[in-house]
Amino acid sequence: GESVGLHLPTLSVQEGDNSIINCAYSNSASDYFIWYKQESGKGPQFIIDIRSNMDKRQGQRVTVLLNKTVKHLSLQIAATQPGDSAVYFCAENGNAGGTSYGKLTFGQGTILTVHP
Amino acid sequence: NAGVTQTPKFQVLKTGQSMTLQCAQDMNHNSMYWYRQDPGMGLRLIYYSASEGTTDKGEVPNGYNVSRLNKREFSLRLESAAPSQTSVYFCASSEWRPGGYEQYFGPGTRLTVT
């Protein structure tokens, strides 16, 4: 079936570096993507989203890039901090704005570790 | 504003026992969801409710039932628990707003079935 997956399961960076987390998706009909952060023992926290009619979207210290040609999504975190250490998931939805817009398919996750 | 709340936080069941996981949100969201998360994996959708009065199956509905009690509450029931249902269960609610998409997850219920 359709799936969303990640290239790297773990990423270690030094505090202050920029981090890039990648995600590949296989459903060409996907039109909405979300990045989540999940800290240990907590539920996922919404970071940033992007719709398929965009290539790039920026938030506070985070940027999501979407390449529909190769079905690839990335999350860039600027000036990574120890508090950014968590598992990061990408998720996709094939019917953004419709009644099933919350029916998300999640990737496996990438563990980001930030060393002081 | 508590967001999404779930009870209980932890539960241990014996095989064959039943239980109901409770979820409530105070953000006036129309849509609510139940996910499960197994170790080292992303979340998988069990059931969802696009609006009050409707429920639909997600990716892994077998062994579960849901009830959308009212706009605020969405419960998940295990009628006869099995060890394969050992997992962390997350409830979420969401809504499209003029300013963007809102979605919040609860803190999770850690369930162990022995």
Image: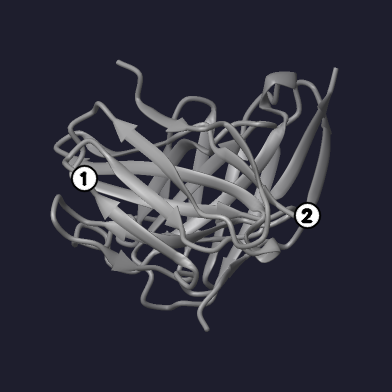
Give A27 or B14, whichever is nearer the viewer: B14
Residue at which label 1 appears: B69
Q: Quadrant of the C terminus of chain A?
A: top right
Structural crowding at the residue carrying mark 1, measured as other residues with C-alpha within 10 Å and reported as few (<14), some (14–19) or many (≥20): few
Residues under labels 1 and 2: Cα distance?
Answer: 39 Å
Kind of residue at badge 1: Leu
Single out the mark in the foreground, 1 or 2. Answer: 1
Measured as percent of width and height from the top left, residue B45 is found at 46, 61
Same chain for marks 1 and 2? Answer: no
Residue visible at 70% across and 26% down in the picture: A80
Q: Is residue B91 found left or right of A79 in the rendered image?
A: left
The chain under label 1 reads B
Residue visible at 30% across and 45% down in the picture: B74
Q: Residue furthest bottom?
A: A1
> Which element carries disc 1, helix, strand or loop?
loop
Residue at which label 2 appears: A9
Badge 1 vs badge 2, beta-carbon distance below 8 Å: no
Give B92 or A101, whichever is nearer the viewer: B92
Q: Is residue B105 found left or right of B42 in the rendered image?
A: left
Residue visible at 25% across and 26% down in the picture: B26
Residue visible at 17% across and 32% down in the picture: B28
The dot on residue B11 is none
Vertical arrangement, residue B75 with respect to residue A1, above or below = above
Vertical arrangement, residue A41 with respect to residue B30, above or below = above
Measured as percent of width and height from the top left, residue A77 is found at 62, 34
Q: Is residue B41 found left or right of A105 in the rendered image?
A: right
**Residue B61: quarter of image:** bottom left
The chain under label 2 reads A
Measured as percent of width and height from the top left, residue A45 is found at 50, 34
